[in-house]
Image: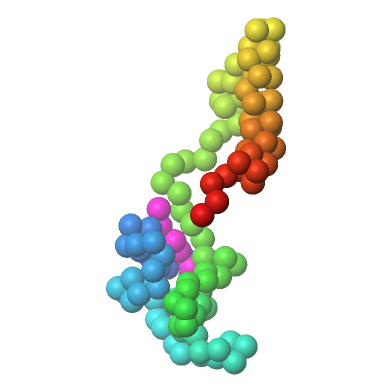
Amino acid sequence: MTFHCKQCHNLLFRKEDIVLNSPLQFSKCENIIFKESLRVALPVLEMRCSRCNSVIGIVQQKPMLFVPDIETITEDLITPPIELENFSEQINNTPLSQEDNLIAHYITSAFYWGALLLPLGLAFFGKEK
């Protein structure tokens, strides 16, 4: 998966290059320039495209946080998009039998009642320290 600048289509970085979107890892990318700036009176680093100089994201310094500008970055996926014509043929639209509907109903109701009764049970019968 790669990320490109929308204006000049410059390759900015690959998903594999960035570990957990850590802003410190972006400094290894050659196509990104960092420029110090102030946003709402907070010191930030603006990430800019090296070719067209457009802002592609902001790195807040305290705490360290990366905020991409979604308007200026495009994401190319490795897998091609699904063609809807072929996709609709692959779906099997056979209705469920009565037994399958009953099993689905039991599972749904178990989750529903469990979600309602579990917090109450823990509140009343939970261990007190």
Residue located at (52% from left, 40% from top): 81
Q: Position of residue 16 (x, y in %)?
A: 33, 57
Query: Quadrant location of residue 124?
Result: top right
Residue, far front = 129
Image: magenta residue range: 1-5
Q: Is residue 42 magenta?
A: no
Residue plotted at (56% across, 70% down): 69
Q: Residue at x 67, y 36 (%)?
A: 117
Given residues 56 and 84, the one toward you in this image is 56
Q: Main secondary structure of the magenta part?
A: strand
The question of residue 3 being in magenta is answered with yes
Q: Is residue 18 left or right of residue 102?
A: left
Q: Position of residue 122 (x, y in %)?
A: 60, 43
Where is residue 66? Give x, y as percent. Answer: 48, 72
The answer to whether 20 appears left or right of 57 in the picture is left
> Is residue 65 in view from this perspective?
yes
Q: Is residue 93 visible?
A: no
Quadrant housing residue 12: bottom left
Spot occupied by residue 62 in the image (x, y as percentages of width and height): 47, 82
